Every structure is written in C-alpha cells, then in structure tokens.
C-alpha cells in the first residue's frame, strides 16, 4: 500500500518573492523507504522547495500532504511535529552543548525533579548505536567534533524523533570521501527502516550512487520525476541546464580572438605549491598577460579558497607566490590590490556589495580604498567614472545615485566588476561572476571577460558551470578535494576530459 | 579531517573529546582559582583575614549583587544584556520604602515589588523579541525609565522603619561559634540554587543555553526560542526586584540614586565568573564566584588602609578586561577544536 | 511633498519645532533672545549652551555608531579630562594664568586622545565587541578620574579656563562656538575627505570593505580617537562651567544622551548611513526636552522618564519589524532579505 501512497505529496506549490516567482506549480512526491534526489542548478528553486516543506517559508498556493494529512506549515516546529526532519549543510545544532543534549534537546526525558540525565544518556547512546556511531562519546561537546560527525549527530537527532521524512540539504559538501561513505551507510540504514529521504547534492556521482528516484527543477519549474537508473548522466545534465544551453551557445567560442598568451614574457602571476592549512593545497599556477585561467572543480573542491589565497584574503602558509617574478607574501587584500590584483567574490551580498551606498560610491570604493581616506577621489572624477561604466557595461537603471541594493543581481555584478576595472588591475580574479543572474547579463559579462583578456588583462575565472569555464579559458586548473590535481591547456578539452581527471585522481 | 576512519579507535577518541570538552570549564575554573589565590594572599598579608567570618561577610555585604548577577547570567547566556538592573533595584527600593511609609503590610509590599520587577523585565523582553530591537538599547531605555520613575515617587531619600524590614536588617543567623550570616544571604543562596536547578534541570534552562549556542539552530530544532528570550528578561527583572528588597534590608531606606552603576558590577561579576558575553557558555555558580571576587577586591582595599575606595573600580575594570581577553582566547580555541 | 515626508530629517526637525512651540505656550518670552552687556541671552541660547557638551559627544558617537560600534566610555572620558585639567591647574604655581589654563586644556585633550586610542585598540586590533571593549573604560574610568583628583572635588579659579564653559565671544557663549566649530570640523573631515563614505562602507559591510582593500582597522581606530577627543573637550566644558572637577558626577549618563541624540537623528544603531545634522537636531531635542520639563514645573530628574519614552518611540519607528507589523504583512521579514540565497 505504501508503494502507492506517497509519504509526502506536494502538488502545485508556488512561492513568490517580491519581483521573483521562486516556485511555479512544482510537484514533489516522496515514498517510504526511498532516497529521492532533488536536482537543479543554482536558482532552480531547490532550497525554496525544501524551505516550503520544512515550514520556513509559507506557500502561496498548492497543497502539502504528509502521511495522508494536509498541512499548511508556518514554522519549522510544525513541520517537525509532522515527522519531517531536516539536516542542513551548515549544521544546525548547538556547538556549546553535548552530543546527547543536541540529540534530545527539547525532548529530554523528565522525571520528578527535572531532566532525567541518565535516561538522556541512555537514549542518545541507543540512537548512536543504531547508526553505528557508537564510538562517539555522548557526553562530549559538539564543537569538539568534525563537521562530518556533527552532521551525523544531526541525523541521529532526526532518527530520535522517529522522523518519517528526512531532508538532507547538501550534506556532503564539506566531507571527504571516507566521510561520505559513512554518511551513505547511515542513509541506507535509515532507508531500509522505511524513512523517506530527500537528498540534495551538487555531486552527480553521489546522487547516482545513493538515490532511487529524482525530481529535476529548473528556473522554479518542475522538469520531471525520474527513476535514477533510467536517466543517464548526460540526460540529467541537459534537463537541469535545459534551454540555457542554447542561449549560451550563441556566444560561440571566439577562436579568432585567441592570440596565444604572451608566453615569452615572465608570467604575471606564478604560484608554486601555494596552500593553507585547512583550506587548499598544492596550488601551482603560471599565468601570463592576456590569458584566462579557468578553475574547474566541484562545489567545495577549493576553487574559492584558491582565489582567496591568491588575493591575500586568507594568508597562505605553504608554498611561494610571485608577481612579475618578484616573490610576494600577501597579508591582506590591500597588499594584493597594490600589486594590481583584483578579486570579485562569489558571495555578492556578503562580500561584495555595500548595500546602503549608491552605485557611484560602490564603483569607486576600491579606488578610494587604495588612495586612503585623506585623498578623496574628486566628485567630478567619481561622476565621470560612474557614467562611463554605467554606459559601457549597460548598467540599469542608469542612475549613479541609486542604492545598489535596489539593483538586480546582474546589474549588481556589473557594478562590482566595474569597481575593479576602475583600479585597472593586471590580474582579475572572478569567482562565479555569472551565478544567479539572468541570461542577458550573463552573456554580456562573458563577452566582457573575453575582451578584457584581449586587451592584455590576465583573468582567473571560476564557475560551477563547466561549459562556461571551457568556453572562456585558455588554461584550466582542476581542483579536487581542496587540492590542485591538474593544470591543462584548453585545446579542445571537453567536459568529459575534465571529469575524467577529477574522477581519476585519488584524493 | 578524516575523523571517520573505517576502524574507529573508540578509547582514544573518547579521551580526546573529553579533554577538549573540559575547555568549557576553563574560564569558570580560572575564576575559582583566582578567588582562592586572592583569599590566600589576603591571609598571608593581613592577620585576621583568614577567618570564616571574613568570607561570610563577603556574602553578607553582596547579597543584592549575587541576585543581580544570577539574573544577568540568564540574560547573557542567551547572548543578550540587561543594563536596567541597577535602576530597577533603585525603583524596587523606592516602591518598597514609599509603600511601607504609607503603612502597607510588608509582605504585600514585597509581593508587589517582585511583581513590578518581573513585569518590567517581561515588557522589555517583549519589546526586544517582538520588534527585534537590540537588547542593549531597550534595556538602556529601561534604565532611564526605572530611574526616572524613582524620582516620580520621591526626589528625597525615604527611611524604612517597618518592624519586619528592620528585623531582617538586624537579624543574624548563627552558623557556628562566632560565625553568622544575615537572612539576606540565605535568600541570595536560595536564588542561586534555584537558578542552578532551572538552568541545568529544566528544558527552559537548556533552551537558554541553546539560544546562546545558536539562536537560529535552536529555532530550527523547534525549541521555544521567543518565549525563552522574553522570559530571561523577566527573570532578570525579578532578580533585580529581589535585589532591591535585599538592598532595602541592608540599607533600610529608599533613595533614587541608590545602586547607580550597579549594572556594571553585575555584568563584571558575570564576565569574571566565566560566562561568555556572546552567550552559550557559563555557569551561575561562576557568577557567584565572580561576585565574591569583586567583594574580595573591596575587602582588600579596606584592609589596605592606604588604598582609596576608587581603586575598587579600577581593579574591577582591569579584571573585566583580563577576563574578556581570556574569553577571546578561549573562543578562538573552541573554534579551532 | 512626498519626498519631504520621507526625508529622514523631517520628523526630528518637526519634533524639535513642536517642543519649542510647546514651551512658547507656557512661557511667552521663551523664543525671545535679548542682548545684555553685548551678550546674547534667552532660553534658546541656554538650550544651545547647556546642550553643547552633549552635541560634542554625540558628534563623536555618530561616527562610532556609523562604523558599527558604540562608545560607552565617553562619560568617564569626560570626567577624566575634567579631572586632569583641573588638577593640573590647581597644582600649578600660577593657577590663574592663561598659560596654565592652556596647559590644562592640552593635557585633557591628550588624555582624550590616549583613551580613544585605547578603545580603538581594543576594538580594531584585539577585536573585542565595541560595547564590551568600551565597557571596560566605562567601569574603570571614573575610578581613574578619582585617582587623579584623589577623590576630592577640585575647584579652580582661572578666568581663562572658566571662559570655555561660561565665557562669551562676539556676543555668543564660547561653548556654543566650540560645539559649532567641532561640528564644522567633523563635517569637513568626513565629507571633504573620503572618511565619511569609508566609515559607512565599513559600517554597512565590513567583510566586503576588507575585500575592496579598505583598511578597516585604521578607520575604526580613527573614529574612536575622534570620539575620545570630543569627550575630552566636552569634559573641559562641563568642568569649566562649574569651575570644578567632579570625578563622580561629571558627564554622568551623558553617553546615554549622546546615543539617544544619534538615534533620534536617524542614524541606525546597526551602523552605516549617518547624519551629523540629524545628530545635532537630536541633541537639541534632548536639551529642549529637559528645558521643557523644567518649564512645565515637573521635577527635572523626571526628564529620564521622558527620555526613556523617546528612546522607545524612536526605536519602534526605526524598527522594520514594527513597520511590518503595522502594515500587517503576512510574510516574515526574513524572506525578503533571503531572496538571493533562496532562489
């Protein structure tokens, strides 16, 4: 009977944010004892759908049925009462409390005179044993454990509530291969006990390894529901990317532009075994003027970490770095900027925008910062620069006094690019410059990158979209598990080639 | 990173995590150690310092501060702060003194004062929670309001002549030969015991810690975060009112300028007692030790005839700084672990 | 008209005007300013003069708050400044000369700068939260001031020194001129250089500012030093006004008034965009409120109650949550800000 009636049946779910339709009539069904993968690119609506199911966001229309009862969740507590548990990528437990407390917090067994701590210990141990995690001391403080263990403890917590539905939101992004296997063992144990598991991950191989069925979303809409073994990898990728592929294809590979980089001169940037404990290691790069280096690798492979090391946002503690043949140690972004390096972060909102300042103030910020506060960039220069870049980058609205937080993502990204272009850098590091912005802006930014390189600027380009990396780069550096594992010239390299390198190198 | 190997070594792992787990007691242990060291130094330097009564006097002279520190511990554990406590003490004293002067029954007065304090705190908590305004500014407004209300009651000092209050002020409870405490000490210690119980044996208490460890996590775990956050300010208000009553027992008067700056002493006691200002770590017994340290500083200065009273403030400031730096080190360690 | 209603200075200015009119209702000569012995006198002048220390401290506080900080130690710094200058003057061989007064002022200013450096050090180098870092000096500061004065109230009689708080120049009280000068300097310093924008940038988004190459450390340090300087000058005014240094009561609660002035002036406690003019209006509102209470015949101490009510009202007006509740919005606030993460 359970084969037919789903544990969770979400149908026609729509959620609208001001100006954005995040979800448009999406369906999702979860059955007892299955691992169901929720797939989609950034911006497909995966997180929104999960948040609707866990009561974080109220839905605008549609129905959510759990175990036969229709719900309208308005808080996480209500979803939990309906036996839905969630384990997030950033572990949502209390690091200051013990493992056993984290497992039982809010449901501690009580007796006359308060919490029955012995019983707490017993129950925690029982759950940990069930998940073959008996080696974890229930009395130890959570923060003394690795993220992987913390995640397993979060799962233990949901097992303890006897959850019928377990949502795992990017649980593997910071785990190494052994840890992933341990997690999968736990997931299989739970699946065999009849729990319906919703698994979200960027790692295709993991999805194929663990999931039974999958639901694919794109741009807030449902693409379809498939059996994992019936949908080959390429089929899945094309369903996830969909029409975007055609749109991107318009930007044909500009072979004509590609004069080989000026190999005869000393490289602008040279890194030898650069690394930082706990961040990334073995970064070896040689980048000449006018070259584009693409950083490829899966989410969490160390792409952003590499960029931060090269920019001095994090201090390297291994290896060497030289600019124009002179050895450098970057202690802060300031020193890197003074050497002509610029870095546009993947995290626009947290690490890029000064939301409450105007477009103009944001544009001249880096230039002003390098001059120091005493020497203000004259207002007329500010206006000129702002007008120039608003025009050349087609920033809309074309109003230099608009607050940047009121611009769309694509236009914000252009302002941030312009912030660095104003400083006229020799090396521009772009981390996910095209993420979460519309196709039009995306194409514009890609064209801009090509023309900047043609003008002699060196560029390091990071993107989760491998095709984009392949299309733009002269060289490709490949990262895996926070280590640089390959560095190849891009002469007809295909996605498969890169994937092979990633798959073929042991961690 | 590869903690999860295929062949886990249960024994070794457990021992390491136990050891690391001990780190959370470090600031509190430092406090107790500091107290013992100071007491030992005092005993070495001054004849008569090493007596039970000197220790008991630390309690007798600081009953109100102990109770305030208890309330403050709840608030700081959630990551908040309550700047209004000193003013609420003064307000409680004024209400008590004024009503007693008007001939009210002392027990009714006490009940009313406690109710007022708790309500005052709850209202601040509600504003903080419902409107998402920083605790610091809301309780600052509370500080103004309570202090201003004192003046509304009376600008002058009011003497308390009520027989029950005077009896409480003069009563001494003998413990052993030549050792005694005041009734206030008993009350203060009962408050500490109740707080300890609530923090460690009730779900409410564990939620207080959970909020300090991560408010959004606590919320996602389905804990009663909003209710708990409002209640801690209610508890702090109630403690301030109890502190006010104890201070009335101690001083037998109500005065609008009383307990000025006592919020700083309470915060200092809590911090010196090992509670992290960012919340989540700390013990109410540590706060008690913190108050005793502030008390012993004062005792030192009174024993050392040449030092003037203002050294108390300077030393408290220095201690506060030292413990904040210690916390800074500690939290860095926690992050690394 | 709509733009005028939305301007963030509209409401504070309106409140100030209403308060002044209220006073005029009760005392018909309230708004009149008369000339006596070539000096200006009147309630308005009194408000400006008595409000000068608060204005000064609030100026420093505005920049500190804009940088996402807070300076709780300003009252203690003011007390220390008064204490060192009065003690210096009192102990000097020639306690009534201009030179001595200048020496006292110089020592106080240096003290303010040093204490500001200390606060800035704790916040920007050690990385302690501002409220806690400055709490240290708030706690210890009055003890230090008493240490300087040896617990006494130090009275000085030095005409030049007295002029700072009570003197006149060109018909105007010197304290007003000093406050006006400080306001001008702060305005020029922040808007003629890039300091203002960079303070705002650090206050709005410290992480992004660092990645844009901004040296937040030096900027944060600068604002605390400026705040210390303002507090020291205010302390000089206060002690000069009563020709004595009172380590216990000089500048008591002035940090609260200053924070209040900043908040009323429309600068958010969360940091970022600030308005010096707003702060000026805020400080004047507070001073006028005090005067109003006095005019209405209420015991002056009760002013605290009114200040508390003003704080609460202003904070509620600024709270986006409160506004949302008023608009009866169904969706949680978190949703809008999370949009970029969510979709």
Image (cartoon, coloured by chain):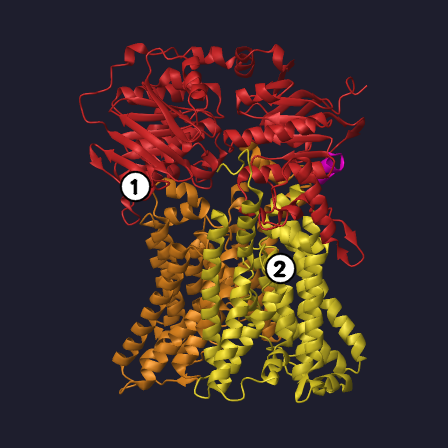
Pick the front one: B18 or C121? B18
Q: Can see residue A399?
A: no
Residue B312 relative to residue B91: left or right: left
Where, by quadrant of the figure, is residue B109 drawn?
bottom right
- The spot of residue A440 in percent (x, y) is 45, 19
Per the rendering, the colour in which chain B appears is yellow
Where, by quadrant of the figure, is residue C170 drawn?
bottom left
Q: Can see residue A346?
A: yes
Q: CA–CA distance between discs 2 and 1? A: 42 Å
Q: Is residue A80 magenta?
A: yes
Per the rendering, the colour in which chain C appears is orange
- The residue depicted at 56 percent of the width and 14 percent of the height is A236
Q: Mark 2 points at which residue?
A: B75
Helix, strand, or loop for circle 2?
helix
User: Are the residues under marks 2 and 1 on the same chain?
Assistant: no
The chain under label 2 reads B
- The spot of residue C307 in percent (x, y) is 58, 64
In the rendered view, tell whether residue A126 sits above or below residue B227.
above
Residue range (magenta): A77-83
- The spot of residue C22 in percent (x, y) is 59, 64
Q: Where the C terminus of chain A falls, by quadrant?
A: top left
Where, by quadrant of the figure, is residue B124 drawn?
bottom right
Per the rendering, the colour in which chain A appears is red
Residue C292 relative to residue A471: left or right: right
- The residue depicted at 39 percent of the width and 40 percent of the height is A277
The chain under label 1 reads A
In the rendered view, tell whether residue B149 sits above or below residue C156.
above
Pick the front one: C48 or A287? A287
For label 2, the crowd category at 10 Å Cα-Cα, with few meaning under 14, some 14 to 19 and many 20 or more, is many
Q: Mark 1 points at which residue?
A: A330
In the rendered view, tell whether residue A435 sits above or below residue C36.
above
């Amino acid at each position: 009977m359970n084969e037919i009636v789903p544990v969770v049946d979400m149908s026609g779910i729509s959620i609208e944010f001001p100006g954005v339709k995040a979800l448009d009539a999406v369906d999702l069904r979860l059955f007892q004892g299955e691992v169901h993968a929720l797939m989609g690119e950034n911006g497909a609506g995966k997180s929104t759908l999960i948040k609707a199911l866990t009561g974080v966001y109220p839905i605008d229309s549609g129905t959510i049925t759990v175990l036969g009862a229709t719900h309208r969740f308005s808080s996480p507590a209500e979803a939990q009462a309906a036996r839905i548990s969630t384990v997030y990528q950033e572990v949502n437990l209390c690091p200051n409390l013990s493992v056993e407390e984290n497992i039982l917090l809010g449901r501690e067994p009580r007796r006359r005179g308060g919490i029955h701590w012995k019983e707490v210990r017993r129950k925690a141990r029982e759950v940990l044993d069930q998940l073959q995690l008996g080696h974890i001391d229930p009395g130890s403080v959570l923060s003394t454990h690795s993220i992987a263990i913390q995640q397993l403890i979060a799962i233990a917590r949901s097992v303890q509530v006897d959850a019928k539905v377990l949502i795992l939101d990017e649980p593997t992004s910071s785990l190494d291969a052994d840890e992933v296997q341990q997690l999968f063992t736990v997931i299989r144990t739970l699946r065999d006990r009849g729990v319906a598991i919703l698994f979200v991950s960027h790692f295709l191989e993991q999805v194929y390894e663990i999931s039974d069925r999958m639901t694919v979303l794109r741009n807030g809409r449902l693409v379809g529901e498939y059996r994992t073994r019936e949908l080959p990898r390429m089929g899945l990728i094309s369903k996830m990317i969909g029409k975007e592929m055609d749109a991107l294809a318009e930007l044909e590979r500009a072979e004509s532009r590609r004069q080989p980089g000026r190999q005869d001169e000393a490289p602008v940037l040279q890194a030898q075994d650069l690394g930082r404990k706990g961040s990334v290691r073995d970064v070896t790069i040689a980048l000449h003027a006018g070259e584009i280096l693409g950083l490829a690798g899966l989410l969490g492979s160390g792409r952003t970490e590499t960029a931060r090391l090269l920019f001095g946002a994090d201090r390297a503690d291994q290896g060497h770095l030289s600019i124009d043949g002179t050895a450098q140690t970057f202690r802060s972004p300031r020193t890197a900027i003074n050497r002509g390096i610029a870095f546009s972060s993947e995290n626009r909102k947290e690490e890029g925008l000064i939301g409450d300042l105007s477009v103009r103030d944001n544009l001249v910020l880096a230039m002003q910062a390098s001059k120091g506060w005493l020497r203000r960039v004259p207002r007329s220069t500010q206006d000129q620069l702002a007008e120039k870049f608003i025009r050349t980058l087609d920033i809309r609205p074309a109003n230099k006094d608009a607050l940047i937080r009121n611009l769309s993502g694509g236009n914000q990204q252009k302002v941030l690019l312009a912030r660095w272009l104003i400083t006229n850098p020799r090396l521009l590091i772009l981390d996910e410059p095209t993420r979460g912005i519309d196709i039009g802006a995306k194409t514009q930014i890609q064209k801009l990158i090509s023309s900047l390189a043609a003008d002699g600027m060196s560029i390091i380009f990071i993107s989760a979209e491998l095709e984009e990396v392949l299309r733009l780069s002269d060289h490709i550096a490949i990262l895996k598990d926070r280590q640089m594992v390959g560095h190849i010239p891009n002469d007809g390299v295909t996605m498969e080639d890169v994937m092979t390198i990633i798959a073929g190198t042991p961690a | 990173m590869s903690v999860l190997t295929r062949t886990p070594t249960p024994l070794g792992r457990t021992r390491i995590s136990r050891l690391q787990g001990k780190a959370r007691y470090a600031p509190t242990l430092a406090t107790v150690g500091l107290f013992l060291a100071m007491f030992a130094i005092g005993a070495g330097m001054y004849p008569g310092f090493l007596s039970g009564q000197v220790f008991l006097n630390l309690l007798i002279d600081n009953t109100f501060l102990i109770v305030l520190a208890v309330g403050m511990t709840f608030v700081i554990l959630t990551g908040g702060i309550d700047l209004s406590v000193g003013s609420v003490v003064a307000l409680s004293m004024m209400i008590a003194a004024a009503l007693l002067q008007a001939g009210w029954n002392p027990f009714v007065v006490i009940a009313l004062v406690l109710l007022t304090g708790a309500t005052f705190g709850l209202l601040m908590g509600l504003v903080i929670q419902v409107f998402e305004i920083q605790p610091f500014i809301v309780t600052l407004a509370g500080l103004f309001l309570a202090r201003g209300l004192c003046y509304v009651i009376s600008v002058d000092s009011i003497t308390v002549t009520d027989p029950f209050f005077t009896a409480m002020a003069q009563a001494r409870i003998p413990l052993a030969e030549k050792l005694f405490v005041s009734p206030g000490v008993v009350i203060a210690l009962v408050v500490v015991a109740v707080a300890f119980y609530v923090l460690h044996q009730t779900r409410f208490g564990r939620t207080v810690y959970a909020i300090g460890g991560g408010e959004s996590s606590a919320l996602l775990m389905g804990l009663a975060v909003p209710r708990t956050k409002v209640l801690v300010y209610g508890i702090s208000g109630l403690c301030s009112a109890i502190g006010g009553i104890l201070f009335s027992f101690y001083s037998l008067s109500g005065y609008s300028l009383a307990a000025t700056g006592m919020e700083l002493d309470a915060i200092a006691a809590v911090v010196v007692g090992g509670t992290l200002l960012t919340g989540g770590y700390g013990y109410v017994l540590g706060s008690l030790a913190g108050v005793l340290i502030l008390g012993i500083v004062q005792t030192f200065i009174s024993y050392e005839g040449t030092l003037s009273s203002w050294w108390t403030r300077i030393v408290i400031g220095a201690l506060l700084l030292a413990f904040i730096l210690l916390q800074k080190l500690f939290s860095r360690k926690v992050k690394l672990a | 008209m709509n733009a005028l209603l939305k301007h963030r200075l509209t409401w504070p200015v309106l409140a100030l005007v209403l308060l002044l009119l209220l006073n005029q209702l009760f005392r018909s000569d309230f708004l009149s300013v008369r000339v006596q012995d070539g000096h200006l006198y009147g309630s308005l002048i009194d408000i400006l003069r008595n409000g000068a220390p608060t204005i000064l401290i609030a100026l420093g506080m505005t920049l500190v708050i804009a940088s996402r900080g807070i300076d709780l130690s300003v009252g203690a710094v003011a007390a220390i400044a008064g204490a060192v200058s009065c003690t210096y003057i009192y102990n000097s061989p020639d306690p009534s000369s201009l030179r001595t007064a200048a020496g006292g002022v110089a020592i106080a200013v240096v003290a303010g700068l040093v204490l500001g450096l200390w606060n800035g050090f704790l916040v920007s180098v050690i990385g302690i939260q501002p409220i806690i870092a400055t709490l240290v000096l708030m706690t210890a500061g009055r003890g230090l001031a008493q240490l300087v004065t040896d617990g006494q109230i130090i009275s000085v009689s030095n005409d030049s020194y007295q002029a700072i708080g009570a003197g006149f120049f060109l018909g105007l009280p010197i304290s007003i001129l000093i406050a006006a000068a400080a306001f001008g300097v702060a305005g020029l310093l922040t808007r003629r250089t890039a300091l203002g924008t960079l303070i705002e940038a650090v206050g709005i988004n410290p992480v992004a500012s660092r990645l844009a190459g901004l040296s937040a450390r030096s900027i944060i340090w600068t604002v605390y030093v400026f705040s210390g300087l303002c507090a020291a000058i205010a302390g000089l005014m206060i002690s000069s006004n009563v020709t004595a240094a009172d380590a216990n009561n000089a500048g008591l609660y002035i940090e609260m008034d200053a924070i209040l002035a900043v908040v009323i002036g429309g600068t958010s406690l969360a940091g970022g965009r600030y308005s010096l003019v707003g702060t000026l209006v805020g400080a004047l509102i507070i001073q006028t409120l005090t005067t109003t209470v006095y005019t209405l015949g209420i015991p002056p101490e009760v002013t605290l109650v009114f200040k508390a009510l003003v704080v609460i009202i202003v904070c509620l007006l600024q709270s986006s949550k409160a506004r949302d509740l008023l608009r009866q919005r169904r969706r949680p606030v978190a949703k809008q800000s999370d949009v970029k993460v969510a979709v």
